[in-house]
């Protein structure tokens, strides 16, 4: 088994949306109902999937959005998770602000982001529809899942594993030798030569880097 990469993830969202519960669910498979609030935590853990061990560091930012903006943590991260509660419209609005903050601090470079609507077990108190979540995620070109830290390990782990896969893939792409990157330019030049200068420009717009290398 290869120990290939480490991934640093920052987790943002309103108070009481379940940030700590979601992280602990992913790292330990367990659901623990109550945690000490108002403290930022850095979790370090080795997780195994796809036949690989990834050393993950997850920063649970509790002080934001009520207190100072976690600019340093957002710049530090290889990937970001933004969490809201499906029963709390305000937390969804805060999630929007968090996505905006990430975009502002990290643009123009790309950082993998996942938007998580937590507490989906509380359907009777729902204030944010699945469509709203989907729409916000597509606006920022990020992954989106509704999860329940209380009810299920599977959804939470799928969301984090896909986020880590994306971060890994990006790290691999960035570490590719120059030669291979140049060959991509050569292919586009070849297209130009084949279709001539009068042919319409083909612009391939990709919101997210491809998983395949
Ligand atoms: N029903 C339900 N409750 C949840 C779920 N996840 C967390 N909770 C509850 O929501 C409350 C807040 O959970 P935390 O994990 O402390 O939330 P947090 O976002 O880390 O909170 P702060 O540290 O204050 O920022 C706790 O009472 C949890 O038991 C969930 O999936 N379903």
Image (tube, grey):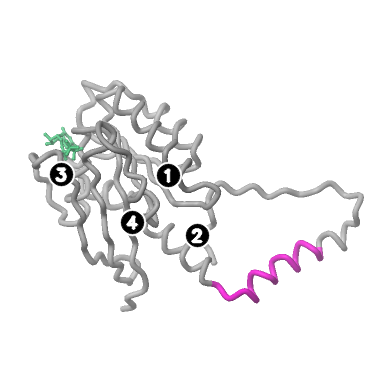
In the rendered view, does 40 fall on the left or right side of 54?
Answer: left
Residue 189 located within the stretch drawn in magenta: yes
Please, which residue is most extreme toward the front here? 68
- The answer to which of marks 3 and 4 sits earlier in the sequence is 3
**Gap in angstroms between the C-alphas marked 3 and 4:** 25 Å
Label of residue 117 in the image? none
Where does the image place residue 1, in percent across and percent down from the top left?
Answer: 31, 78
Q: In this figure, which residue is indicated by the disc labeled 3? A: 39
**Gap in angstroms between the C-alphas marked 4 and 1:** 12 Å
- The answer to which of marks 2 and 4 sits earlier in the sequence is 4
Q: In this figure, which residue is indicated by the disc labeled 4? A: 161
Mark 3 secondary-structure assignment: loop
Where does the image place residue 99, in percent across and percent down from the top left?
Answer: 41, 38
- Which residues fall within the magenta stretch? 176-190
**Gap in angstroms between the C-alphas marked 2 and 1:** 13 Å
Q: In this figure, which residue is indicated by the disc labeled 2? A: 211
Q: In this figure, which residue is indicated by the disc labeled 1? A: 143
**Gap in angstroms between the C-alphas marked 1 and 3:** 27 Å
213 or 13, which is in the foreground?
13
Within 8 Å of ligand 1, the CB of disc 3? yes
For the residues labelled 3 and 2, say whether their Cβ atoms are less than 8 Å apart: no
At 29% from the left edge and 46% from the top edge, which residue is drawn?
11
């Amino acid at each position: 088994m290869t120990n290939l990469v480490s991934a640093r993830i920052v987790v943002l969202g309103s108070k009481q949306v379940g940030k700590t519960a979601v992280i602990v669910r992913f790292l330990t498979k367990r659901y623990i109902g109550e945690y000490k609030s108002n403290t930022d935590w850095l979790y370090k853990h080795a997780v195994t999937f796809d036949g690989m061990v990834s050393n993950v560091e997850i920063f649970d930012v509790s002080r934001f959005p009520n207190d100072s903006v976690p600019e340093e943590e957002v710049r530090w991260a290889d990937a970001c998770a933004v969490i809201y509660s499906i029963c709390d419209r305000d937390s969804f609005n805060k999630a929007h602000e968090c996505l905006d903050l990430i975009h502002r601090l990290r643009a123009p470079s790309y950082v993998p982001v996942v938007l998580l609507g937590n507490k989906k077990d509380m359907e009777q108190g729902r204030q944010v529809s699945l469509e709203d979540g989907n729409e916000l995620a597509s606006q920022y070109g990020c992954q989106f899942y509704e999860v329940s830290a209380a009810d299920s390990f599977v959804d939470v782990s799928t969301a984090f594993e896909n986020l880590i896969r994306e971060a890994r893939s990006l790290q691999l792409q960035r570490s590719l030798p120059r030669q291979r990157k140049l060959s991509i330019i050569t292919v586009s030049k070849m297209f130009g030569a084949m279709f001539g200068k009068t042919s319409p420009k083909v612009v391939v717009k990709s919101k997210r880097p491809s998983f395949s290398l």
